[in-house]
Image: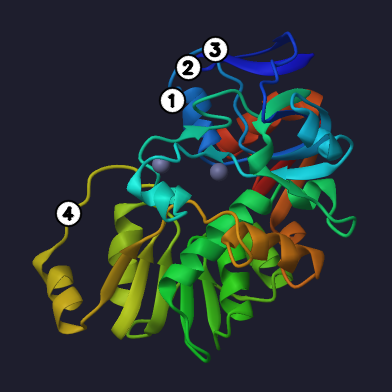
């Protein structure tokens, strides 16, 4: 098979690789579509990953080509979405099915080989069967959709809440859509580029390039990861409100005394959000797939580019250098 293999920082090669070994309880998945996560850019170009060589790609769907265990053969030929986190099943978080906070997890596409390849190996437990109403390209957005839902659930929205998402990346836009679906009143997405204005509109949300002084929101989601966004979101959260910190931090954080006072005097709730819940009737992944299948969640509205697999290097460069405005880029395999 062919795969994009990361041999070192900035050294991604398209090359021949043997088909992945399929152990008992695992499936061989032929990749159909894979999204490029913004976290893939530092992983490939700046920080590297846990070991080399590794095939990146953790947001993908495919079709099951083979399984190792006879009891799993019913999966063969099924289109599937993939939960990329492989939990340890031994830590306290795993004991209560909170796999997103597992302390010894494995991860498809960062800690082990992922979906930027013709085939990849996935535990059967991590597969979700896709209905025909969800396309391959949409299914490549299941992971960000579940991550976005997780953040919005952490915000504890009650009907009519004013919600602001700072950051108009794919997850920010999906979080805005979820906020609406969960009953928020006004939902504003604050972004920085005009292509985002268009995409925010396609998501049925209100776009703002700047928020007027003194305006406050009951629930605020920080979906950037910059010091400036943290200060901004602290100022935007209304008394008694909740601020959900989601963006991966780009450096250390310090707070001015004034901002610290705001947390106290406004009695803010600050909460983190990480990854997404999986398994069970009400998990983020189950609800994300259901909402996509029923057309409630417009995942495709956050896609700016769909490219063929030969164009993956150019798509990575586009995201790295920002040569064109973009939101989610999905690669068809
Ligand atoms: Zn991701
Ligand atoms: Zn665990």
Q: Secondary structure at mark 1?
A: loop
Q: Which mark is residue 53?
A: 3
Ligand 1 within 8 Å of disc 2? The answer is: no
Horizontal relation, residue 303 to residue 250: left or right? right
Please identify, in this view, whether the residue under mark 3 or under mark 2 is nearer the observer: 3
Horizontal relation, residue 267 to residue 87: left or right? left
Disc 2: which residue: 9
Above or below: residue 333 compared with residue 164: above
**Disc 2 + disc 4, Cβ < 8 Å:** no
The residue sitting at 33% across, 82% down in the picture is: 241
User: Quadrant of residue 216 in the image?
Assistant: bottom left
Horizontal relation, residue 115 to residue 211: left or right? right
- The residue carrying pointer 1 sits among few (fewer than 14), some (14 to 19) or many (20 or more) residues within 10 Å by Cα, namely few
- What is the CA distance from the residue labelled 3 to the residue labelled 4? 36 Å
| Location of ligand 2 given as a quarter of the image | top left
Q: Earlier in the sequence, mark 1 or mark 2?
A: 2
Q: Nearer the viewer, residue 61 or 66?
A: 66
* Residue 229 rendering spot, x and y as whole percentages: 35, 60
- Quadrant of the image containing the N terminus: top right
The residue sitting at 48% across, 39% down in the picture is: 87
Disc 4: which residue: 254
* Residue 129 rendering spot, x and y as whole percentages: 78, 49
User: Quadrant of residue 207 in the image?
Assistant: bottom right
**Disc 1 + disc 2, Cβ < 8 Å:** yes
Please identify, in this view, whether the residue under mark 1 or under mark 3 is nearer the observer: 3
Ligand 1 within 8 Å of disc 1? The answer is: no
- The residue carrying pointer 4 sits among few (fewer than 14), some (14 to 19) or many (20 or more) residues within 10 Å by Cα, namely few
The residue sitting at 49% across, 24% down in the picture is: 45
């Amino acid at each position: 098979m062919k795969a994009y293999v990361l041999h070192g920082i900035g050294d991604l090669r398209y090359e021949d690789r043997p088909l992945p070994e399929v152990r008992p309880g695992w499936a061989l998945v032929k990749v159909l579509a894979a999204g490029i996560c913004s976290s893939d850019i530092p992983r490939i170009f700046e920080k590297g990953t846990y070991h080399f060589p590794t095939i990146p790609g953790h947001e993908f769907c495919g079709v099951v080509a083979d399984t190792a265990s006879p009891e799993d053969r019913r999966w063969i030929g099924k289109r599937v979405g993939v939960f990329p986190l492989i939990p340890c099943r031994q830590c306290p978080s795993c004991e209560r099915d909170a796999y997103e906070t597992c302390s010894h997890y494995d991860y498809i596409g960062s800690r082990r080989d992922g979906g930027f390849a013709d085939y990849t190996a996935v535990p059967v437990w991590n597969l979700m069967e896709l209905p025909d109403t969800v396309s391959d390209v949409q299914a490549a957005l299941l992971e960000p959709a579940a991550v976005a839902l997780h953040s919005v659930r952490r915000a504890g929205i009650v009907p009519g809440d004013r919600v602001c998402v700072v950051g108009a990346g794919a997850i920010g836009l999906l979080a805005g859509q979820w906020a609406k679906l969960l009953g928020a009143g006004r939902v504003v997405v604050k972004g920085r580029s005009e292509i985002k204005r268009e995409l925010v509109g396609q998501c049925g949300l209100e776009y703002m390039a700047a928020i007027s002084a003194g305006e406050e929101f009951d629930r605020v989601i920080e979906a950037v990861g910059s010091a400036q966004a943290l200060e901004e979101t602290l100022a935007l959260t209304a008394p008694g409100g909740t601020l959900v910190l989601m963006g991966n931090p780009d450096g250390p954080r310090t707070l001015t005394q004034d901002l610290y006072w705001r947390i106290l005097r406004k009695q803010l709730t600050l909460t983190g959000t990480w990854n997404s819940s999986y398994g069970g009737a009400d998990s983020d992944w189950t609800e994300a797939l259901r909402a996509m299948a029923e057309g409630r969640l417009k995942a495709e509205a956050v896609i700016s580019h769909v490219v063929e697999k030969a164009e993956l290097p150019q798509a990575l460069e586009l995201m790295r250098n920002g040569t064109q405005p973009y939101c989610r880029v999905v690669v068809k395999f």
